[in-house]
Image: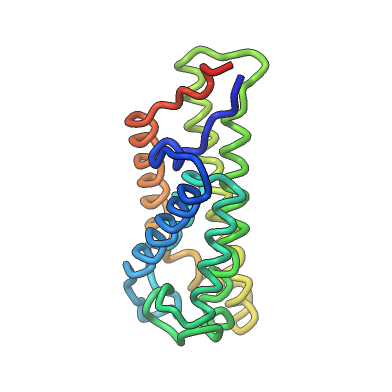
Amino acid sequence: MAQARVLAERVMPGEGMAWELARMVAANLLLVLCAKIAVPLSWTPVPVTGQTFGVLLIAVLLGSRRAAVVLGLYLLEGAAGLPVFQPFGVPGPLRLLGPTGGYLLAYPLAAFVTAWLVERAQESPGREPSPTRRASLGLGWLVAALVVGELIIFAGGCARLAIETGWKQAVWIGAAPFLPGEFIKMALVVVAVRGLEFARPDTSRLEA
């Protein structure tokens, strides 16, 4: 049985390097747009942004290797001074050393691990479950993968803040205020992924 294609290949079908590049550019633009959704908070140097939504969605869409590459290139673009990060904070490489730098530097790893977990769930099992059971397992794995990705991002962010504030304060200002929003973002990722899967069903498993 053929391996299931990543969701981005079903949304933007096509073969060759040109299509690969187009999908990665589209993912990069999505992340930049998500970064522009930003609201500063008075009690923490970390603003509310749409970036984690973009990171997790790109991970599920592109797969582990491509998602990690896209996030790595995103960091290079920001370090080069391009206006790709959220608008609050110093530009260029100093952003990676600032209070939000830990979150940013965790993005490639979070994207890779999230996508890797999703890929494990997509592998054909030795014994095919019923459609209802398969859908349940798929949703459970997706949610678990998203939670792991969130934990990696916030671990990186709080580790950077803890250098100056200590861990207790870092968690208080770097994670706790954002938990309700992160649950909403994960729910939106699930809705987006399920909607795309319904609109673009994968037929590759039917190929010999």
Q: Nearer the viewer, residue 28 or 148?
A: 28
Q: Nearer the viewer, residue 165 or 151?
A: 151
Residue 186 horizontal/vertical position (percent): 42, 48
**Rendered residue at 57%/51% (across/down):** 66
Q: Quadrant of residue 29?
A: bottom left
**Rendered residue at 42%/35% (across/down):** 10
Q: Is residue 27 left or right of residue 145?
A: left
**Rendered residue at 62%/43% (across/down):** 116
| Above/below status of 62 relative to 30 | above
Q: Quadrant of residue 128?
A: top right
The reply to whether residue 191 is visible in this rendering is yes
Q: Is residue 187 left or right of residue 171?
A: left
The reply to whether residue 53 is visible in this rendering is no
Specify the quadrant that holds the C terminus. top right
Residue 92 horizontal/vertical position (percent): 50, 84
| Above/below status of 78 relative to 133 | below
Q: Residue furthest right?
A: 126
Residue 133 horizontal/vertical position (percent): 50, 18
Q: Is residue 38 left or right of residue 68?
A: left
Q: How many marks?
A: 0
